[in-house]
Amino acid sequence: MTEDILSATGLVRRFAGVTAVDDVDLSVRTGEILGLIGPNGAGKTTLVNLVTGFDRPDTGRVFLDGHDITRLSAAQRSRRGLVRTFQGARIFGRLTVRENLVVSALPRLGSRRRAESRADELLEYGEVTALRMTPGERLSAGTQRIVGLLRAVAAQPSALLIDEPAAGLNEVESDQLSRLLSAISENMEIGMMIIEHDMKVIMSLCHRVQVLNHGRTIAVGSPDEIRRDPAVLTAYLGSSSGNAHA
Amino acid sequence: MQYLIDVLSQGSLYALCALGIALTFGVMRLINFAHGEFMMVGGYVLVVAGDIPVWAALLSSVIIVGFLAVATERIAFRPVRNADPETMLVTSFAVSFLLQSLAVLLFGSLGRSVRVFPPSITGVMHIGGLNIRWLDIITVAVTVTLLVSLMAFMKTRHGVELRAAAENFTVARLLGVKANQVIGTAFAISGVFAAATSIVLAAQRGLVEPTFGTTTMLFAFIAVIVGGMGSLPGAVLGAYALGLISVTSQALLPLGLRQFRDAFIFLVVVLILLLRPEGILRGHAARVRI
């Protein structure tokens, strides 16, 4: 278990009689991409909130690099290397692309000069150098996601949670984002967890996939195993979002 | 031309005040009604300073109001930082009344006269039929200087953090921006702008009273709202628009109606807000937040 960069055991969260997350474990190793999927209302968002510190579990623990972070706030977790991206990127629209990355790199690197050179490196890495002086609000949705991802990476996280990276993107944009995600995973020492509805993205990108339904883990395994898992098929076909084969 | 100078001068005064208000609103969604009292304190510093050299009086005003703004944040606003905007608003009323009452206690409710600049530079220049007051030039120059400095500051490390926090405080904090530091900075700068406004205002009026800052602050608030709540360029734009409306209605209204000038100004403001409810430049406060 010590090689897991991010892990959780026995997480439970109840809301007024509904158990949104019911005894869920998870683990992510450095260099690994874990996909988290499940029908709407399966408890994905609640689980992410528990892991990132936006919400606290009723029972259960969260560990980052072997340290118990269950009681830490989201900002404290972020400072320790557990960084998340947001649905719809949430980049700063009035800051330039480069400034978006600089803000994120500053706390770790301390000086503005170092933060800027880190930002420039990453902009090149994500092939968006040409846009470095463009205000965030002028970017297309796809580019905003890329910048949001680069901004998270600029904080030099050891674990990265990526919330619906492909939602609302077209095919080309989502392919571009997938390529960047896998490049980051291969070249940087980061454990990644991706929450995503787009099965194509999940199946092509993730090393392991964990499926939630009604707040419980119903399957964990390789993309191929998950594709064939009868419990997963039932869960998806039994709900409105029957896109397990997409 | 004369008209343009009046617009610039009036707009600059509003802009100085509006920027101070927009800064603290941007970073913590605080509608700071005590901003006018920051200006009032700046005015009384000039009264008390009396005969010391002009530069020393101005500097003390800036420093004291700057510290007052930071101290107010520490003592009054930090405890309610995560409360509803209404709670923060009421807190700012409390600070406002407290400072006004203190002023009445210390200096009386009647005005105290003040001479900010020596008479040599309070006169009027005559250039080709134009009457240009030195004070108008000073007002515009101070505003432009502070605006340029503010823009330069916004490119620095702390400036970038401030802009990020003003746009989305939650995300900025998660990225490691320190809340106390960034809010403290915003208040310090807001205090400097309040002091600058008070210097210009004291020089114009020659009188400081407990309600010294109230009217200007009210107009500056309108400028901030018209410009787009939370947007700094919007606040400046709104301020000059308000200056324009104010000077224009002064010039165009028939003599009998001039005493209702402010009512006409507000009428125009209402019309603008009916057409663009989010302000001239859309403030980010109007956008969806996490």
Image (cartoon, grey):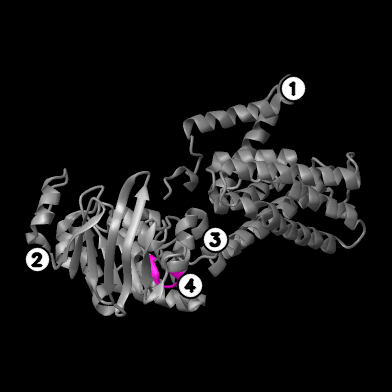
State how far apart marks 4 and 2 are (Cα).
Answer: 41 Å
Question: Does the segment drawn in magenta span residue A82?
Answer: yes
- Check the image and report above or below for A6 versus B149: below
Q: Nearer the viewer, mark 4 or mark 2?
A: 2
* Residue drawn at (84%, 42%) of the image: B209
Q: Secondary structure at mark 4?
A: helix
Task: Give neighbour class at mark 3: few <14, some 14-19, many 20+ (Cα, 10 Å).
Answer: many
State whether discs 3 and 4 lie on one chain.
Answer: no
* Residue drawn at (38%, 62%) of the image: A52
- Check the image and report above or below for A124 versus B32: below
Residue A206 x %, y %: 19, 67
Amino acid type of disc 1?
A: Leu
Q: Quadrant of residue B31?
A: top right
State whether discs 2 and 1 lie on one chain.
Answer: no
Any part of residue B1 in sight: no
- Check the image and report above or below for A105 versus B205: below
Q: Which residue is mark 1?
A: B255
State whether discs 3 and 1 lie on one chain.
Answer: yes
State how far apart marks 3 and 4 are (Cα).
Answer: 13 Å
Amino acid type of disc 2?
A: Asp
Q: Which residue is mark 2?
A: A224
Q: Earlier in the sequence, mark 4 or mark 2?
A: 4
Disc 3 is attached to a residue of which chain? Answer: B
State how far apart marks 2 and 1 are (Cα).
Answer: 85 Å
Residue sitting nearer the eye, B127 or B30: B30
Q: Which residue is mark 4?
A: A106
State whether discs 4 and 1 lie on one chain.
Answer: no
CB of mark 3 within 8 Å of CB of mark 4?
no
Q: Secondary structure at mark 3?
A: helix
Highlighted magenta segment, given as a residue range: A78-83
Q: Is residue B39 left or right of residue A26?
A: right
Q: Label for residue A14?
A: none
